Image (cartoon, helix red, strand yellow):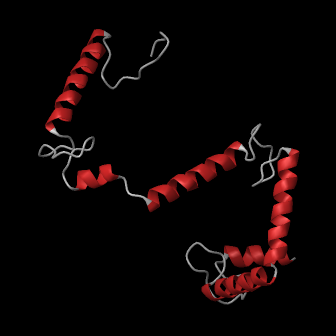
Amino acid sequence: MKNEYYSWYKEHHICPFCRVNKPVGNHVYCHECRAKYREYQEKRIDRNRDEIYQKNRERYYHYKEQGLCVSCGKPAVPGKVFCQKCANKKNRKKHLKKLKNTTDPRWLWVEEHRCYLCGKPAIEGHKLCQKHYDESCKWLEKARAVAKEAKIGLHAPFTFGGGKA
């Protein structure tokens, strides 16, 4: 019965907690109820911080001993503590955090109109200095010659191992 009310309020874009206000954006609960719930969670975590920490550590070691992913409980990759999905997610978050916290000097070079590869002054309208521009033109000519010899377009899919595209 409770689940039916929840679904009905959710479908009619009414907060299922207070049953009065409209939800904010794509959320299910209104702004006031979300704030109350957030405050409740903070108090609960503050009261039970050590207990929550201990339960999480126990679950971590239990899953690790069983060869399960310590994050979701599914079978882990052999020799690892995460399943492939959780490992990818963790690596993606780690990569994004690294990108957020550091700046790649190459992008700064481009903004300052310097060569993307070496930092020297770039040619007008390009991201490369004269030396690297000449090298890239030389390599492009070779690629076009190989493509012409193979009678394929430069943008045609390449196959490796002698198969036909």
**96 vs 34, nearest the viewer:** 96
Q: Identify the residue at horizontal 29%, vertical 14% (top origin).
A: 146
Where's residue 53, x and y in %? 80, 70
Where's residue 22, x and y in %? 61, 84
Total of numbered circles in the picture? Answer: 0
Question: Please, is residue 34 above or below residue 108 in the view?
Answer: below
Where's residue 148, x and y in %? 26, 13
Q: Residue furthest left?
A: 124
Where's residue 52, x and y in %? 81, 72
Q: Identify the residue at horizontal 80%, vertical 47% (top origin).
A: 74
Q: Identify the residue at horizontal 21%, vertical 34% (top origin).
A: 132
Q: Quadrant of the N terminus?
A: bottom right
Q: Quadrant of residue 149?
A: top left
Question: Please, is residue 165 above or below residue 16 in the view?
Answer: above
Q: Identify the residue at horizontal 73%, vertical 81% (top origin).
A: 41
Q: Quadrant of the C terminus?
A: top left
Question: Please, is residue 15 above or below residue 111 in the view?
Answer: below
In this rendering, would 1 be left or right of 146? right
**12 vs 47, nearest the viewer:** 47
In this rendering, would 17 be left or right of 127? right
In this rendering, would 165 be left or right of 68? left
